[in-house]
Image (cartoon, rainbow, N blue to C red):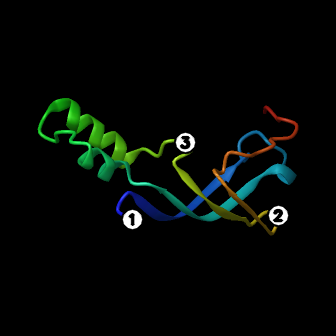
Amino acid sequence: MRFFLLSVTYGTKGYRFSPPENRERNLGLEIGLNLEEILHRIGVPEHKWWGKALFVVATHIRFPYTGYGIRYDFDHGRWRGPDFGDKFDPGSVIYD
């Protein structure tokens, strides 16, 4: 279990260019990969410059498709998932 993380997430979709009926505010619960622990176990050295760079990236950036879970959409009052959170229909895009 050390290679997995349990996360509470929050995210919005469509608030910049989508009409109000397509916007989403999502609170979720996800299980994802612990990339920092995976780097330790495969032997990436932390004392080398490239190892430090890998650890910084693995610790602070979430990679797509590394977390799977469910989300509650506050704008539409419904649950979404289980999935990777990659589904969104922006509707008619509005450019101001």
Q: Judge from the rendering whether residue 40 lies leftward or rightward of residue 82; answer left or right.
A: left
**Residue at the spot of label 1:** 1
Viewer-proximal residue, 79 or 25? 79
**Residue at the spot of label 2:** 76
User: Residue lying furthest left in this view?
Assistant: 47
Residue lying at 42% horizontally and 44% vertically, measured from the top left: 61
State which quadrant residue 79 falls in: bottom right
x and y percent of residue 69 in the render?
A: 61, 60
From mark 1 to mark 2, how far is it between C-alphas? 34 Å
- Label pair 3/1, CB-CB below 8 angstroms: no
Residue 25: assigned label: none
The amino acid sitting under disc 1 is Met
Residue lying at 67% horizontally and 45% vertically, measured from the top left: 86
Above or below residue 39? Residue 3 is below
Residue lying at 22% horizontally and 30% vertically, measured from the top left: 50
Q: Nearer the viewer, mark 3 or mark 1?
A: 1
Q: Helix, strand, or loop for circle 3?
A: loop
Viewer-proximal residue, 15 or 71? 71
The amino acid sitting under disc 2 is His
Nearest to N terminus: mark 1 or mark 2: 1
x and y percent of residue 65 in the render?
A: 56, 44
Q: Nearer the viewer, mark 3 or mark 2?
A: 3
